[in-house]
Amino acid sequence: MKIAVCVKQVPDTWAEKTLQASDSTLDRDAADGVMNELDEYAVEEALQLAEAQGGEVTVVTMGPERAAETVRKALSMGADNGIHLVDASLHGSDALATSYALAETLKGRGFDLVIFGSESTDARMSVVPAMVAERLGLPQLTFAQKVEVVGDRVTIQRVSEAGYDTVEASLPALVSVVEKVNEPRYPSFKGIMAAKKKPVETLSIADAGLDAAKLGLSAAWSSVEDFAARPPKAAGTVVTDAGDGGAKIADYLSEHKFI
Amino acid sequence: MGEVLVLVEQSDGGVKKVTTELLTLARSLGEASAVWVGPGYSDAAAATLAEFGAGTVYVAGDAAYADHPVAPKAEVLAQLVAEKAPIAVLVASTADGKESAGRLAVKTNSGVITDAVAVSPDLIATQSVFGGSTVVHSKVTAGTPIISVRPNSIAPVAAPGAAARVDVAVDLSDAAKKATVTGRTVAAKGGRPDLAEASIVVSGGRGVGGPEGFGVIEALADSLKAAVGASRAATDAGWYPHQFQVGQTGKTVSPQLYIANGISGAIQHRAGMQTSKTIIVVNKDPEAPIFELADFGVVGDLFTVVFQLTEEIGKRAH
Ligand SMILES: Cc1cc2nc3c(=O)[nH]c(=O)nc-3n(C[C@H](O)[C@H](O)[C@H](O)COP(=O)(O)OP(=O)(O)OC[C@H]3O[C@@H](n4cnc5c(N)ncnc54)[C@H](O)[C@@H]3O)c2cc1C
Ligand SMILES: Cc1cc2nc3c(=O)[nH]c(=O)nc-3n(C[C@H](O)[C@H](O)[C@H](O)COP(=O)(O)OP(=O)(O)OC[C@H]3O[C@@H](n4cnc5c(N)ncnc54)[C@H](O)[C@@H]3O)c2cc1C
């Protein structure tokens, strides 16, 4: 089975994230870049499927030069090879452009399964997997808390508000995972050493056959008008419980008409 | 005035509260029309849509539309966008809503904005990003603006509409039928409101100490008719089911009232609750960062404080 995993490099979630004044895009240099947390689960799921059934795992990212670290991380977890789409004209791409670039990069490579995280921690749109499925005409099996492949059928549990839906399709298919799906492994020392020798294809938009007019900030289908830091919240009242803490909260709640 | 399409969020044949919020917003932008996809359109649904001002309800009622996830909604909306040329399409910021929006954006070559908390009459969306620390105004610049709106962002206001039913039928593409829903499993819900939609959320964290400790949190929640939330420390430990996790990798909530008990206030937790209108904190550590968000906070043991609070609410309700 040939499996692709799409991973995004995002600012470390512990860092305060900011937009840059020059073009209203995320200031990616202000914080360390890490693999989007849910994408670690996507890599783990791909590795487990490949280990159980035999197969090859290719990690795919679109992002600036330093996103290569994120590809390496996936390789050190055990992925076999990588594709890094990097080009100055990709900067500022919106969801339409990102899904276009990823779909074109994935196309025609014979992947049986493409696995995504279900949401990035920076923009948090949760749309790219569905958009790539739409572009490639692949069955969409997203928000999976469980993934099973038997023969050429893939079955997932899609998390719903009420519980979960069971969703099935034939391969090739597209899956996105939530964090309940597995427990990602840490790269071993051996894995880290091995990753240094694994092949990574670095593609410019020309290499990938992409149309520059559909990419980057200038082509975006949406634009930021302005942005501002949220005004800090006025300090509230904090009291120490002296046996009446619960009653004090009840007073506050009735003053504010909650009870 | 142009037409604004609102994709209806359903539950058990009825209409979810977020749809009444979206209709209220749609009316401030143009003529509100609701779009119902799937079987089970009921009189109760029609009544709610009428109450909140839907002029037209497009009903794509074929049972087959519910057999496949997301794609049928996008295909019904795409056909309506082509036929009616609406000025905007609004969906709720739920998994289904956002994914329908994404697929629709590809189909109609339109820009998509997610997680708006407001939309102005000139279709500029306000997004609250990075866990609420930054406010962004953004606009779709190509195609039909497709905007997903976060639940609890707009106060629903009733205003009668005709809710005139117009049946629509769309031949699903082969691609839309490739994934099939073969079962639906409903987790025990216990009659509490939906976490993302609730106007009051009571949450517990590691300070709750174990699965039994959540009994105290649930009792408080029930006294306020609130939903229960949990920090990741609590869900990871298996003390409370994962679908109730609030935060960066859980649900984003924006209720009128959020009560955080035994939660320290890590940046990833704040990302999911920072925009709550009123925040109350109970924590035994006066240095816990969650107090920075508190409108009212009590430094103390949650077991005594929450117990007393629940009792007081019971007394005052009578
Ligand atoms: C604060 C903020 C708000 C934004 N708002 C909008 C908006 O409203 N509309 C809009 O069109 N764009 C917006 N953008 C741009 C958006 O970040 C990019 O378009 C992004 O590529 C897609 O959004 P996402 O990261 O939320 O993806 P999601 O859909 O949340 O990502 C899901 C999965 O897709 C995969 N994936 C995503 N990006 C990549 C990548 N570059 N390489 C490989 N795999 C990837 C990963 O597996 C990931 O887990 C915003 C950006 C920021 C920083
Ligand atoms: C990528 C990433 C994503 C994450 N996503 C999320 C997310 O979605 N949601 C989330 O919540 N976290 C998330 N986290 C985890 C987050 O960093 C914190 O670890 C987590 O929120 C801590 O949970 P907590 O506040 O319950 O526990 P702790 O930080 O351990 O806090 C427990 C608090 O309880 C108090 N306490 C203890 N006993 C009592 C008592 N008897 N009475 C009163 N107070 C008491 C303590 O003083 C302390 O402040 C994420 C982390 C990462 C790295």
Image (cartoon, coloured by chain):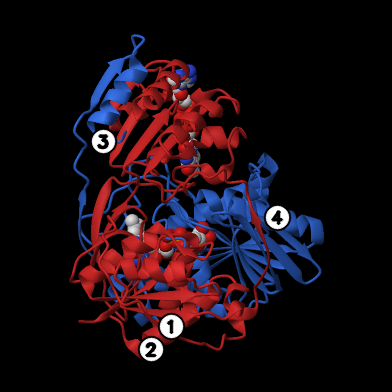
Mark in front: 1 vs 4:
1
Residue position marked by numbered label 1 in the rendering? B78
Which amino acid lies under the numbered mark 3 shown in the image of this protein? Lys
* Residue at mark 2: C-beta within 8 A of ligand 1: no
Residue position marked by numbered label 2 in the rendering? B82
Give the answer, above or below, for where A32 lies relative to B63: above
Question: x, y (%) of residue B111?
Answer: 34, 74
Residue position marked by numbered label 3 in the rendering? A257
Residue sitting at x 39%, y 47% = B253
Mark in front: 4 vs 3:
3
The answer to whether tags 4 and 2 share a subunit is: no
- In terms of image quadrants, where is residue A79? bottom right
Alpha carbon of mark 1 to alpha carbon of mark 3: how far? 44 Å
Describe residue A232's horizontal placement relative to residue A199 as left or right.
left
**Colour-to-chain, blue:** A
The answer to whether tags 3 and 2 share a subunit is: no
Alpha carbon of mark 3 to alpha carbon of mark 2: how far? 47 Å
Question: x, y (%) of residue A150?
Answer: 80, 65
- Furthest toward the top, the residue is A242
